Image (cartoon, rainbow, N blue to C red):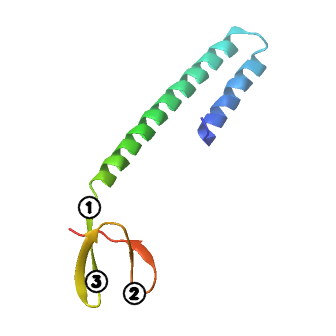
Amino acid sequence: MWNPLSWVMEAAAIMAIALANGGLPGWQDFVGIITLLVMNSTISFIEENNAGNAAATLMGCLAPRAKRTQNRALLEQLAAIVNDDKGMNRLQQGG
């Protein structure tokens, strides 16, 4: 619950109680806001979990071997950090 929407909903729940002066409508608003906050948090958790699983699946599908050139020859090696001619490291994927 660390996003601006959650903070606004928490503030609204506190204001509903503070402005109710002990009356019933304030408690009903409070319970409704907290219910929506819990539902929002649950949906956010499920979506983040699914996104993490999708990213892990995609990373598992990366090519295990990389192609690179060295002295004008095309070499194939295990996919890892490959040093290019400019001294920069980058990950290259080959088919």
Give the image location of residue 59, x and y in percent: 33, 54
The kind of residue on which mark 1 rests is: Pro
Residue that sits furthest to the left in the current view: 95
Q: Position of residue 58 (x, y in %)?
A: 31, 52
Q: Please give the residue where the numbered disc 2 appears in the rendered image.
A: 85
Secondary structure beneath label 1: loop
From the top left corner, tell me how far across and down residue 76 is, in percent: 23, 74
From mark 1 to mark 3, how far is it between C-alphas? 17 Å
Report the amino acid beneath label 2.
Asp
The image position of residue 83, as x and y in percent, is 40, 78
Residue drawn 69% across and 9% down? 24
Q: Secondary structure at mark 3?
A: strand
Q: Identify the residue under disc 3.
A: 69
Q: How far apart in space, not on screen, are marks 1 and 2 (Cα)? A: 22 Å
Which mark, by number, is residue 21?
none
20 or 52, nearer to the observer: 52
| Distance between the alpha carbons at the discs numbered 2 and 3 | 9 Å
The reply, left or right, for residue 23 in relation to residue 43 is right
Residue to which mark 1 is pinned: 64
Q: Is residue 92 above or below residue 45?
A: below
Q: Quadrant of residue 79?
A: bottom left
- Callout 1 environment at 10 Å: few (<14), some (14 to 19), or many (20+)? few
Instruction: Pick whichever of labels 1 and 3 is earlier in the sequence.
Output: 1
